[in-house]
Each structure stands twice: as C-alpha cells, then as structure tokens.
Image (tube, rainbow, N blue to C red):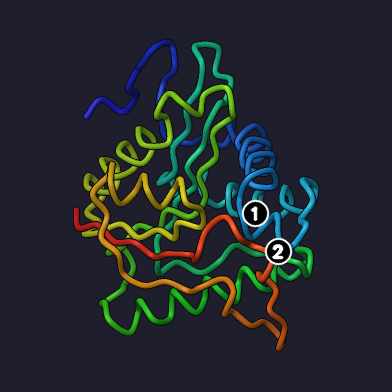
Amino acid sequence: MNIAEKTRKIILKPLEPKHVVAATHCISTTFTKGEPMSEALAISEEEFSYFAQLFIQKAAIDQLSVVAVTDTDEVVGALICEDYASPPPTGLEHVSEKFGPIAGLLETLGERFAQLHNVIPGSHLHMFMCGIYPQYARQQFAQRLISFAEDIARERGYKATVCEATGAVSQHMVKNSLGYTYVDEIIYQDFQYEEQAVFSTINTVKSCVAYYKAL
C-alpha cells in the first residue's frame, strides 16, 4: 500500500506528532457542533479539546490513526483510532464531568461486545472519533479515511474494526457505504446515567449503534 493516498489535492496519511494540535482542533470543533451526545450535554469546544488531545497524543505514538491534509499539510479531517484492548490515555481524571454519560454509554457497549468477541491486543481496531471540516464534508473524506485506516490495520495484522456511530449520517455511512455489520445499540431515550435520562433531548437519531467489520 502506498502509505499516502492523494485525491484532489488532499492527501491521506497516518497521523504524526506534528498533526496533534491541528487534529485536536478539527475533532473538537466538529464534534461540539454536530455530534448528538456532545450537543445534548452542552460540552464546549474547550472541554472537548482537552479530552480529544489526550487520545490524539496517544494516537500519534500508536500510528493507527489517519488525517486528511492539504498539499501544505493543513489538516482538514482526522480519524482517531486505537487498539480496542489498549488502556486509555493518562489524564482522563481531569476531563469535564460532562463526559461521564458518554463514557458510561460507550463502556456499556464495549463490555457487551467483549462478552461475545475475543478482544485481545492486536485483534480489533477501534475507530473512535472522526471529524471533517464542513467545507469538505460532501467529498466523502470520512469514508476515505476509514478505508485508509482499514488498510493500515490489515497491514498491522488486525482481524476486525469496531466503531460506535452516534448520528444518523455516520450510521448510514458505515452500514451502507462501508459494509459494516450491526452489533448492538443503546437507545438514547432509555439510557440512564446516575438515574437521569441525560440524552432525552436527542431527537435526530434513535440510538448509538456499534458496528463491526472483519478485515
């Protein structure tokens, strides 16, 4: 595989340490303005930026994540991936308490997935966060980033990829455009965190859905 795929003056390449700041900005701005759970919890861009940077700094070391950059190395999209069995980055104890419900929902899906699949280091790639700036959203860069990350995962010996699609657009994309298989879901209206229906205001999509794809 050519490790840098060039398409219409946009280059897809593995995320490197030099991309951390720009990728963090891309992820934090796009998630706080479009991701259902982040919007429901009123997570600010600053709060999300701290959270995202912890994972992106780790991702730059792991070299499983990918970015879309211009020919001047400006980041226009990023897909943050991790080994599904790897420990979380350090520093999460300092993130905003607003992330508690998101972590709780994703941990529930993850635990249920692990009960049915043999998840060990090097077996499953977790596609965690994907953000594309709005002006590039209609050029299928999210799909291209995911496909590129799948190629890297295959080269590294991973057997499958896993993702949680939180919105209607991402659910349609991974299921209908990228061939992912439904695994599990948590309905937003039913989810309780500390006895509160924290996602009851989400009305644009029914649930957070976990998907799987064998490589």
Q: Work out whether residue 125 or residue 132 is closer to the camera in this orientation and state it.
A: 132
Q: Amino acid at mark 2?
A: Gly
Residue shown at the point (31%, 28%) measured from the top left:
3
Q: Quadrant of residue 91?
A: bottom right
Q: Quick one: SS at disc 2?
A: loop
Tell me the tag on residue 121.
none
In the displayed structure, 1 sits above or below 161; it is above
Residue visible at 69% across and 65% down in the picture = 201
| Pointers 2 and 1 in contact (C-beta within 8 Å) | yes
* Total numbered labels placed on residues in the image: 2
Q: Is residue 1 left or right of residue 12?
A: left
Where does residue 127 sit, x and y in percent of width and height? 42, 53
Q: Residue 123, position in %: x, y?
A: 27, 64
Q: Nearer the viewer, residue 89 or 175?
A: 175
Mark 1 surroundings: few (<14), some (14-19) or many (≥20) residues within 10 A: some
Please determine whether, in this image, residue 75 is positioned above or below residue 121: above
Q: Position of residue 153 (x, y in %)?
A: 29, 48
- Label 1 sits on a secondary structure element that is helix
> Of all residues shown, which one is farthest toward the front?
203
**Disc nearer the start of the sequence (2/1):** 1
Residue at image point 51% right, 57% down: 166
Q: Residues within 10 Å of mark 2 (few under 14, many from 20)?
A: few
* Residue 149 image point, x, y percent: 34, 42
Q: Which mark is residue 91?
A: 2
Q: Which residue is mark 1?
A: 54
| Three-letter residue code for mark 1 | Leu
The residue located at (57%, 37%) in the rendering is 17
Left or right, 176 with respect to 189, comes to: left
Left or right, 212 with reference to 133 = left
Screen quadrant of the N terminus: top left
* CA distance for labels 2 and 1: 7 Å
Q: Nearer the viewer, residue 137 or 204?
A: 204
